[in-house]
Image (tube, rainbow, N blue to C red):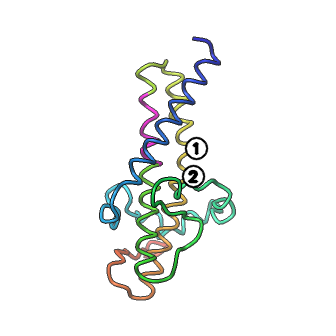
Amino acid sequence: MSAGAQVLAYSMAWATFGMTSGWWVARWSEATLDHDTWLTRIRPWEQEGRIYERVRIRRWKDHLPEAGAWFGDGVSKRHLPGRTDTDLRRFAGETRRAEWVHWMNIGFAPTFGLWCSIGVTAAMVAFAAVVHLPFVVIQRYNRARLHRLLARHGRPGSRVRTVHPHGK
C-alpha cells in the first residue's frame, strides 16, 4: 500500500473510531456519569485543577473545537448551562462524558499495532496523546472548578477532597 493510501486508511480509522466512541458515550445515562470513577477522579497532584493554570489553560482552552452537542441530547461545554446545583452537577457529568471519549480515543491508538509496523504504531500513540490529552486536561480542569464551586457553597455531594496547594 502506498504511503498516501496508508495515511488515508489511518485517517479513516481514527475518524471512524472517534465518531463511534462519541456516539456510544453520548448514550450513557446521566446516572452513569454523576460520579467520578478511578479514571475521572481529580487527583491530589492536580491541586483542585490549579496545576493546569501553570500551562496557561485559560488562554488556549477556548480555541479547541467542542463537539459535545453533536450527538443526540449532547451538551456543549463552551458555557455553563446555569448556576443551580442540578445544572452544575449535570455539567460535571458532561465533562466526565467528554473525558471518557478522549481516553477511549487514546486507548485506540495501540490497536494500530495489529496491522502496522512498530514505528507507525508509536507514531499513532504519540498522535493520540498530542491530539486528545489537551481535551482531557480541559475536562479535568473544568470539573475541578465545578467541584470547588459546589464546595464553596457548602453543597452536599460535591465529593471534593481539599488539598492545600503547598502540600500542608
In the rendered view, tell whether residue 124 sits above or below residue 114: below
Where's residue 98, x and y in %?
Answer: 47, 56
Q: Is there CB contact under 8 Å for labels 1 and 2?
A: yes
Q: How many marks are shown on the rendered structure? A: 2
| Residue for point 53% across, 36% down | 15
Instruction: Identify which amino acid the numbered label 2 is placed on.
Output: Pro
Report the front residue among 24 and 65.
Answer: 24
* Label 1 SS: helix
Where's residue 134, x and y in %?
Answer: 57, 52
Report the front residue among 40 and 167.
Answer: 40
The residue beneath circle 2 is: 134
* Label 2 SS: helix
> Residue 33 in magenta?
no
Relative side of 40 to 136, left or right: left
Q: Which residues are magenta?
A: 102-111
Image quadrant in which the C terminus is located? bottom left
Image quadrant in which the N terminus is located? top right
Judged by its main secondary structure, the magenta piece is helix
Query: Which picture quadrant has residue 63?
Result: bottom right
